[in-house]
Image: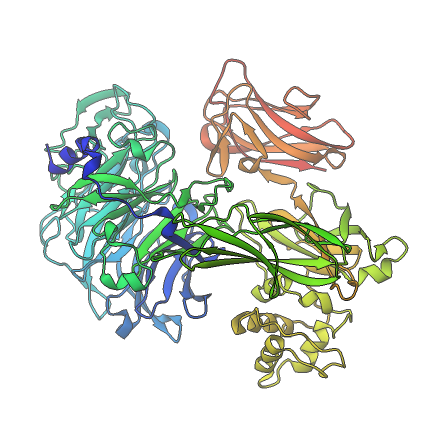
Amino acid sequence: MSRNLLAALTLMVLPLSAQETAPSDFRFHFEVLAESLPQPMTMQEAPDGRIFFHEIAGKVKAFDPRTKLVSEVGQITVTTSQENGLLGMALDPEFEKNSWIYFMHSPTDYDGQYISRFTLKDGALDMDSRRDLLSWPEQREQCCHHAGTLRFGPDGCLYISTGDNTNPFNDSEGYAPIDERPDRGPWDAQKSSANTNDLRGKILRIRPTPEGGYTIPEGNLFPEGTPKTRPEIFAMGFRNPWRFNIDPKSGFVYVGDVGPDAGGDREERGPRGYDTVNQLRGPGNYGWPYSRGNRVYIDYDFAAKVPGAVYDKTRPSNQSPNNTGLAELPPVQAPFVFYPGADSPEFPILGKGGRTACGGPVFHYDAAFEKTGGLPEYFDGMVLFYDWQRPFIHWARLDEEGNLKEILPFTAAARVAQGDDDGSGRFQIKRPVDFFFGTDGALYLLDYGETWGANADSRLVRVSYQRGNLAPVTKATVTPTAGPEPLELTLSAGGSKDHEGDAVTFEWRVGDQVIAKGEEAKVTMKDPGDFRVELVVSDDKGAVGKAVVPVTVGNSVPVVKFLSPQEGDFFTPGEPVSFRLEVSDPEDGASKGREAEFSVRTLVSSSWAAADGKLSDVDPGLSRMKQSDCFNCHSVDQKLVGPTLMDIAKKYKGQPGAVELSVDRVIKGSANVWGPIPMLPHPQHTADEVHMMVKWIYSLADGQTTPTVARGLEGQITAPKDGKLATGLVEATFTDLGKAPAGSLAGKATVKLRTRKLEAEQADALEGPRKQGKVIGSTAHGHVARFRSINLAEVAKAKVRASSGGAGGTIEFRSGAPDGPLLGSLVVPQTGGWDQFQDFETTLTKTQGRADVCLVFVNPGKGGLMNVDWVEFRK
């Protein structure tokens, strides 16, 4: 029995008293550095503190900690079909001197992968500097598994992970894909992972040269010149080693290898699927496709459909006709951690669910971290490992010899889960995709976001550790925040607390005046005006926390209502959406009969997103203007308080120094430039933010209007012409005149729109079916997919894209409930496979009004009916 296996099997009997006291969870601090990063993959910190990262579609970006801005530094052309793309990135160890960056990318003109080096010049990738170090062919007839992490080790070598490039579906049924029938190479991982003469399914190790090539370092699995082998191979026998990291001190490589899907053991095939985290102390074979976890598969004749002999881990042999390497392979190494989709008897802390195992970085403590927010010494030498799909993040504590001693939770300060915020106040991480420990000792993570596609909630996060006496957590609630005078306010400090348990006092202030004391209070504000009600919470050691709530006395918030469109209405990309509004305000009155007066103070804006949450491209300058107060005084082409934005563009565009002058005026304010009315200062914005706003204004030209902003109680917003759009959010804001000395207030209303083609996995409710990436599956008789509030008056037909490799069945469209009136139905037969999608259409009974539409799956007594990609409600 190997040392790693013995450590794993005895893991859970260690006495709790042997464990040290963990740091307090409340001292972990989460800071979001950047958001909306479409499909981020890997990242690395440069010596100057910039964080370089890349997206699977080919963009390379950098976050600058000084400006807090993300900039695009280049784009590499890639294919993203079958899980390809811009897969990995690594900065050269001498990056500060040579500015070299290495990438693993999937070219459009070559069926395979490239490792290429580029030089960063003047903040951008110099595309002419490209040097191709290494390439290897892949089959692109079928999917998938390319891995793609790149890391430099402490030995100066570049480590590269590659996938088995094998289709795991069809006759393999989630077990070992070892189909040796003619023309079934894409379904046989023996051609790649178990092939000593192939670079797929491996961890490669090379030493790049300044000229753009590489040499073979000592210590790889096969000495250079060994027949039927590739000397680049450091470790073999991997399925999809998607994410790995290297301990900068020991040089150990921690590899997460994504496993197959079989949910249970099968006598004639072998074990269920396991994901593994592997500790590579040196070269070795990690078993795929002959073993998984600590179990072995059974040889299988796919033509005769009969099992053969059990594979031997100590002397594995590759007899596949698709093998071009050695027949006799190195013995299989035991995994560091392994777990199935179900609960793990060996590692119960890992829970159950989906699986995408990832090997994370190793933390090494430095006393300097006490001043930089780095993690505490408690975590010294621990390995972070995680799962992108389930998801989870855990620490692996090692003994003095580097063996696994115990697994610890990441921190209770974070909630690692997909779905909506649970209201606990914990920081939510949805799909951790990459980590590193910065030179400051803090942990940096990329969160991929909610879905498998591009997500608006993806983000770059810094996790630091706060030391010393912390200020009390201060939360203030004031109800109401606006209304006529005298205004009675209810004050609450509910949710405020001192993490260390110190005694605290509560004071409520307006300016220098204390208006109340205590955690709860009631006060009456008699004088009109705009005020800042401040809650001050002090502990007995002198630490102070503050929170401010703006309150307006003497003016009420106006009420805005959409007459059209209504919530859930349909839109068509590229076509206008008509809107009509009404406004009422206690002080200003109602808009009816005063449309012209109210229209100039009504701003309508919109945002649009694809089904995966990716926002439609909106100029960042426009986005920041919509978040500020710019449109209270300016319109694109209608004069309000200040000049039109079009007039500003005409006057200044093209003039030397005009952008810088405008940026300065926006931040500091100005007077007598366009008339006697001054522009208020905007110190809340950075120069970089204002620069983006001004650049957008200067981009305006005659005849050009923005489709996302309009002014008035009635008009049109044009949806972007993007066929991938799935949802739109239209927001109307009316700003009243105020009632001196009380300032003006804004009221808002929003409606959410959707395209007629709705992704099945975006159904409002699934009662039985399960999301499986971009489709729903696991459908059985009586299961339901519900789409809420469909305007049936605008629907005459329904079209569905579906597949079935099983029983097939009928989809019934029912109004209101699963047993509601039948609107129509269609039959989905066996289509030839789960990946063989076809379109099916039916006519629906004409119905007035709005109702939930329930797709009910029907085939009595049967399961595994079909997969559904999308449903379209047609005119």
For residue 464, side relative to residue 490 (left or right): left
Query: Which x, y percent locates residue 278?
Result: 21, 42
Give the mark count. Answer: 0
Query: Which x, y percent locates residue 81?
Result: 43, 47
Query: Which x, y percent locates residue 302?
Result: 28, 25
Residue that appears at 88% across and 52% down: 592
Q: Quadrant of the N terminus?
A: top left
- Residue 636 in view of the camera: no
Residue that appears at 61% across and 73% down: 694
Residue that appears at 67% across and 36% down: 873
Q: Most extreme residue toward the top, as rendered?
A: 861
Q: Quadrant of the C terminus?
A: top right
Residue 384 in the image: above or below residue 632 = above
Q: Quadrant of residue 75?
A: bottom left
For residue 423, side relative to residue 268 (left or right): right
Q: Nearer the viewer, residue 534 or 649?
A: 534
Q: Most extreme residue toward the bottom, as rendered?
A: 656
